[in-house]
Amino acid sequence: MSNPSTITIAANSSHPLTVNRLGYGTMRLTGPEIYGEPQNRPEALQILKKAIQSGVNFIDTADYYGDDVTNRLIAEALYPYPADLVICTKVGGARKPDKNWIPYNKPENLRASIDNNLRTLKQEQITLVHYRCMHGHGAPFKEGMDAMFQMQKEGKILHVGVSNVTRDDLEAAMKMGEIATVENMYGHAQRTTHKADHMESNGGEEVLDICEKNEIPLVPYFSLFLSVPKKDTRIAEIAKKYGVNEIQANIAWLLHKSPWILPIPGTSSLAHFEENIAAANIKLSKEDMDFLQ
């Protein structure tokens, strides 16, 4: 099965970015409930440094992780940044002191978030920003996208992406401007829209064909949840076949599912990070993929 080692972001733009096809998501570097400082700060910094040493050059973050914890960790561990490093952040949401997730997606909110990301990441321009859709909450989707493309024109953002979008959202956004990437929930156990705790996560399966047709990388979040919405024993069988763990098998499935998928498995454990990176070396056959379909 085809499993290319790199992927190109904004392939048809004047500023294409080619990155290695296993990134790192920083959300788990925060404290409990994705809030506050990490329980093991030295290990968190070590993971970020190890990521770069391992060839990772795509790191996903958001200023509402922590609150504002992961951005500061990235800057502390990696600044000045390697020339080929793409730091992708998200805007559109925020955290309350009670740890609730709230919309922060009015144009003035988005501008404040971009300015905050620029400051905490010590950058003059954010290379890639995902606008996270908060369905039914806050500003209308089009209003938020207008603000994103305006900041792109101003030079604050190089490439604009979208997150947690439906097919209709994605198609509407593509008519407004160039969409570089899509970040939706996606893994072997969770492929379509899932509702939990009053939050809706839109699945990658619903937009993957659009991404493939238009050469837009799909960046999966929550990709390592193996029992949401239900446990699927097929991943365990493939893991046993290759002598790896189920998370590694799941990462391998994502890499083989489509050359336009850019996994960003996250962890706060250095040992688990190294296991995740090793998953890129697992070669699944067509028979394996047919079994896991």
Image (spheres, rainbow, N blue to C red):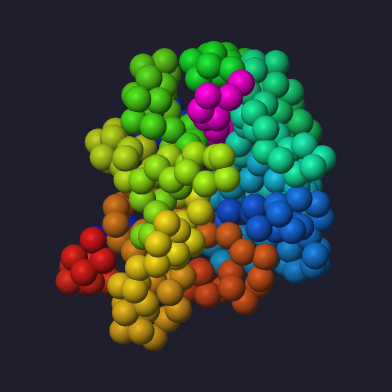
The answer to whether residue 11 shows anywhere in this view is yes
Residue sitting nearer the eye, 11 or 46: 46
- In the image, taking residue 197 as reference, residue 12 lies left or right, namely left
Identify the residue at image location x=52%, y=46%: 196
* Residue 51 position within the rendered picture, expressed as x and y whole percent measured from the top left: 61, 63
Residue sitting nearer the eye, 163 or 115: 163
* Residue 18 position within the rendered picture, expressed as x and y whole percent measured from the top left: 44, 46
* Residue 117 position within the rendered picture, expressed as x and y whole percent measured from the top left: 72, 34
Identify the residue at image location x=65%, y=72%: 270
- In the image, taking residue 44 as reference, residue 83 lies left or right, namely left
The picture quadrant where one finds residue 16 is top left
Instruction: Say whether residue 37 is magenta.
Output: no
* Residue 164 position within the rendered picture, expressed as x and y whole percent measured from the top left: 48, 37
Q: Is residue 213 above or below residue 20?
A: above
The answer to whether residue 77 shows anywhere in this view is no
Image quarter where the N terminus lies is bottom left
Identify the residue at image location x=31%, y=84%: 241
Identify the residue at image location x=80%, y=52%: 36
First to last magenta residue range: 125-138
The picture quadrant where one finds residue 289 is bottom left
Instruction: Say whether residue 128 is magenta.
Output: yes
